[in-house]
Image: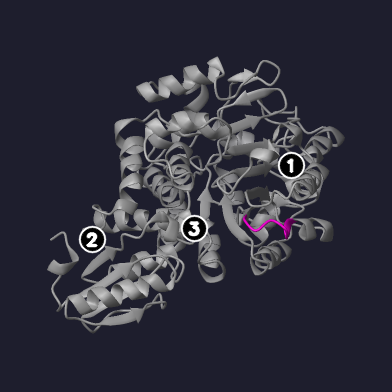
Amino acid sequence: MHTISELPNISTILFLGNNDESTNQQVSELATQNNTVNHGLVTDPEFTPHTPGYYHTTVVDIAFGQLLLVAQRFDSIVMLDQPQAQWSHWKCLSATVKLMVQLEKLKKHTIFRDNQNSKKILDWTDLVYNKNKSFCIYPWINFNNDGKNLKVCARDKSSVTTIHQLKDWSTDPNYTVIRNKMLEGTRIPEHCKTCYDYEDIGIESYRQFETLDWVSQLDIESVKDLDNIHHPYYYEIMLGNNCNIKCRSCQPSYSKPIGDELKKFNIIPPKGTSWDPGSPSIDQIDIDNLNKKSTVYFQGGEPTIMPEVLEFMERCLAKNKTDFNLSMCTNGVKFSDKFLKLVSNFPNTNFSFSIDGFDRINDYWRSGSNWNKVIANAHLLQSQGHFVSINTVPGIYNVTNLHLLFEFLDREFPFTAVYLQINYLRWQSAFNHPNSALVVDSMRRCMDTSIYRSNGKSCKTAIDSIYNHYSSNPTCNFDDLKEFFDYNDQLDRARGVRLADYIPELEATRDLL
């Protein structure tokens, strides 16, 4: 059964489309043609159809994770074949295709694979997940610079070239080598090991997720279209270590207050700690070529307190260039009036809030943070028309209590994308907690939330990977656990706090050493 006309009238059919009146009109026309009725828009995440006929909804009307459950209560799910230009945002189209793929995997009856609006996304999905496990969109779109070296992306541990050697980004021979290797399917671990490591343990990688997002954003039909890209569409800028908090998983190269603390209290950091901050300049962003398909992403430190970010927004306003996507990672602690006034001029903004635990757990991990203020600020930005996403780093601090954050986000931010980024520091690893039973229980409770099923990068797959790891009786590396306690105890003494008062189940594992 591949066509709408072949659907039985005694069935309940859910149509997924864009969020304007055309969806209701199309469903009504189809209902008339097939001698049934359009029961209208579904917005209730608890809705169960009891009357045969047609229904419709969108990822804007019901949050992705909730909609995945709602859709399973219907006999069939149909995605309308509406051109991308008719969708309010490319992400809505991309998310709807991903939702249909998940429903298909759940053995639900779906109609979407013959759609013109799905074909591009499905073809690219097949490429990056199956046919070519080297290919990534970043070398064709991304300008990532730490002040000296250009990299494929923020996770690249090596260098493509230097800012002084670069003459033409689109034709640079070093970039050309990388692009050609990816097209050939040759893996490049010196640049892309982080994504390979994610994929090897079953976690959706940046390579996979970001490629699908960007081909949708840029409306790229095939690999051949990459030849038409002659300037960066993505500026990934890390503006140094000017910050206002001290995260326990951070390093002096990203937070000056941490470096100051380590020196003041003679704290010995773990081996491999990075001290030198990057120093890129906003002058390297080609403001004149920014358009609605471009994204400028600021990292820190804390971008919202950096004078360079304010200056960048002022330069854009002076050039009447505000229609691009402005994004920044933030701890959400405080936004100045000047910052809020400036950013209000940019209609397409996203703030990625770094939140690593529920309530006091977050404040302990992210020293200087204040849970209530952070949540209030997230709501404030949403009320002002900005997009908010959540970035969470599973690690030894939160791997037994992550469900508390997921359950909170289900209640407070059901439409917010949650991105999971595994803690790569071995002494804080999400995969080295000695109490497997507690971790398994927390992951199971995460799985009971709709956030777990959301369209956030690595969200479901990271939870699944952690759950599978601890379900197989893993061995804890006690040398790494001891290194964790040695370093964390030094931070506790300097800050006048105790781990036991915030995460007692983690403190209890000290007895195993």
The image shows residue 152 at horizontal and vertical percentages of 55, 28
Helix, strand or loop at label 3? It is loop
Kind of residue sitting beneath label 3: His
**Residue 354 visible to an observer of this rendering:** no
Q: Nearer the viewer, mark 3 or mark 2?
A: 3
Q: Alpha-carbon neighbours of circle 3 within 10 Å: few (<14), some, or many (≥20)? A: some
Q: Nearer the viewer, residue 150 or 189?
A: 150
Numbered tag placed on residue 89 in the rendering: 3
Using the numbered discs, state the Cα–Cα distance from disc 3 to disc 1 in whole angstroms.
30 Å
Q: Nearer the viewer, residue 398 or 302?
A: 302
Q: For residue 172, what is the image quadrant?
A: top right
Magenta highlight on residue 187: no
Q: Position of residue 472 (x, y in %)?
A: 35, 43
Of 172 and 420, nearer the camera is 172
What's the coloring here?
one colour
Residue 5 visible in rendering: yes
The quadrant of the picture occupied by the C terminus is top right
Magenta-drawn segment: 343-348
Q: Residue at x 75, y 36 (%)?
A: 282
- Disc 2 residue type (three-letter): Thr
x, y percentage for residue 196?
43, 31
What amino acid type should be assigned to the residue bearing mark 1? Gly
Image quadrant for the N terminus?
A: bottom left
Query: In this rendering, would 375 be left or right of 183?
Result: right
List the residue tagged with mark 1: 301
Q: Please say if the residues under marks 3 and 1 sit with CB atoms less than 8 Å apart.
A: no
Q: Choose between 494 and 200: the one closer to the eye.
A: 200
Disc 2 packing (10 Å; few <14; some 14–19; many ≥20): many
Q: Residue 110, which numbered label?
A: 2
Seen as rendered, the residue at the extreme right is: 264
